[in-house]
Amino acid sequence: MTMNIEEIKPRLKAMIVERLSLDIAPDEIKDDVPLFSHENEGLDLDSVEALEIVVGIEQSFDVTVEEGDYKQEFYSINTLSQFVKGLIEQAQ
């Protein structure tokens, strides 16, 4: 399964909103806004929600996320979509 970034972003947003039961529409999540607390910006997600996102990525994109420190990769939808694209490419 080959996907480009513009195909990955809306799927990520929809998955995040659904898995975390966020009270916003997926298209309200801006691509460059921090997903986790950053100077009072972003979605202000926490580490438990990060684990939910990992499980969601694995299920939605049929990839495996190895244990590690992914703070930079999980910074925003932009960085997360690049990360997912790399995982998809590795899985092929």
Image (cartoon, helix red, strand yellow):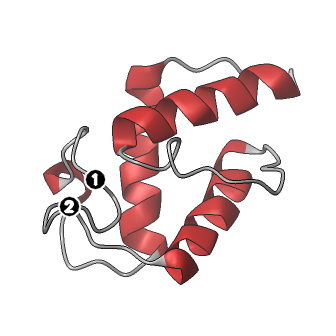
- Cβ–Cβ below 8 Å for labels 1 and 2? yes
Q: Going from the N terminus, do you reach mark 1 or mark 2 first?
A: 1
Quadrant of the drawing holding the N terminus = top right
Where residue 76 sits: x, y (%)? 35, 45
Residue 55, above or below 6: below
Circle 2 sits on which residue?
A: 42
Provide the secondary structure element on which disc 1 rests: loop
Structural distance between the alpha carbons of marks 1 and 2 = 5 Å
Circle 1 sits on which residue?
A: 34
Between 87 and 4, the one lying in front of the other is 87
Residue 50, above or below 74: below
| Side of 7 relative to 27 (left or right) | right
| Side of 43 relative to 9 (left or right) | left
Question: Which quadrant of the structure image shows residue 14?
Answer: bottom left
The residue shown at (37%, 73%) is 45
The residue shown at (16%, 63%) is 39
| Side of 9 relative to 25 (left or right) | right
Quadrant of the drawing holding the C terminus = top right
The residue shown at (61%, 35%) is 84
